[in-house]
Amino acid sequence: MVRAPCCDKVGLKKGPWTTQEDQILTAYVLQHGHGNWRALPKQAGLLRCGKSCRLRWINYLRPDIKRGNFSREEEDTIIELHEKLGNKWSAIAASLPGRTDNEIKNVWHTHLKKRLTKKLATPDSKGHFTAAASTCDSDSFNSSGKMSPQPSSSEFSSFTDSSTRTMETHSTGVKNEQMEEYSPESFPEIDESFWSDALSSDNSSMASDFPAVADELQLQTPELAYGQISNMMDDGMEFWYDVFIRAGGLQEL
DNA sequence: AATGTCTTCAACCGCGTCAGA
DNA sequence: TTCTGACGCGGTTGAAGACAT
């Protein structure tokens, strides 16, 4: 017996997410939470499978995502935990705040596994194979032993700026009636600096109080409190305010 | 400049697990 | 106890970029 598809896929969009879709999903989750992923796309007005929405939120949009290169300490942690746990990516991710299982899985397959293989395969001066023998990152070499076209990651390896590709993807965004009065350039980008910027510096004292604020305002989550406050604080967040108002969730601040 | 090869990583797919009816 | 639906996990894919030829 074949398992039914996770959702009715007729007419549902697949592939890279656009800026507009990101913003709709973010606004919806911040305002309503994600009680039911399967029902969420319909309620939010997204032509996506619930599974796809969940993945996008968890791996890219949620506020506590830490973006950018993995530090040497993080890489060491991954290697150490992988030794103990194997391919339990979610368990490994639990020990690395802000990192997702998908991200860790990718960095393992693209960098760490190769590095370990190289180390184990490289004999020391006495001809012994040792994990500490190689100081040269295997990522600098391709399978034929030539230098890789990619930059060496021997210092801090891993990710290039994924926002580059994402930005390009965003430029082909689908027009949405709710959004069309905004030019794409006017959208505050949800990139690697978005949440960290928002939750640091000027807003830091407020950010630490979001749980209390959420409680005070009888909101579902600290993130929702953040959403409201940031709308008030930052002119650049006018778009979000408008989204919330249009969604009928916030009649007044 | 054109083409080929390799690498990266976001996103998809299928399956296992679990909670609720 | 069984069934069903939703969630979460891990493996895999494929588009796009970077660099070599």
Image (cartoon, coloured by chain):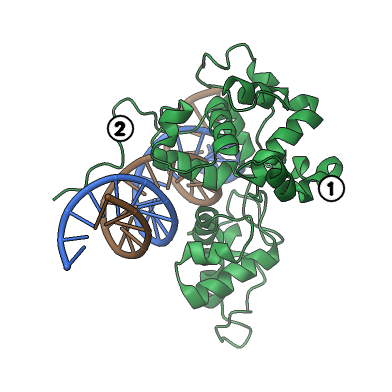
Chain colours: A green, B brown, C blue
Label 1: chain? A
Name the residue type under label 1. Answer: Ser
Camera sees residue A142: no
**Left-right relation of A9 to A80:** left
Instruction: Give x and y (percent) for residue A219.
Output: 64, 41
Name the residue type under label 2. Answer: Lys
Q: Which mark is residue A179?
A: none
Q: Which mark is residue A205?
A: 1
Q: Residue at x 61, y 30 (%)?
A: A167
Camera sees residue A160: yes
Label 2: chain? A
Q: Residues within 10 Å of mark 2 (few under 14, many from 20)?
A: few
Q: Residue at x 47, y 43 (%)?
A: A35
Task: Check contact, mark 1 vs mark 2: CB within 8 A.
Answer: no
Instruction: Give x and y (percent) for residue A211.
Output: 70, 50
Instruction: Give x and y (percent) for residue A79.
Output: 57, 71
Identify the mark nearer the N-term, 1 or 2.
2
Instruction: Give x and y (percent) for residue B2.
Output: 48, 25
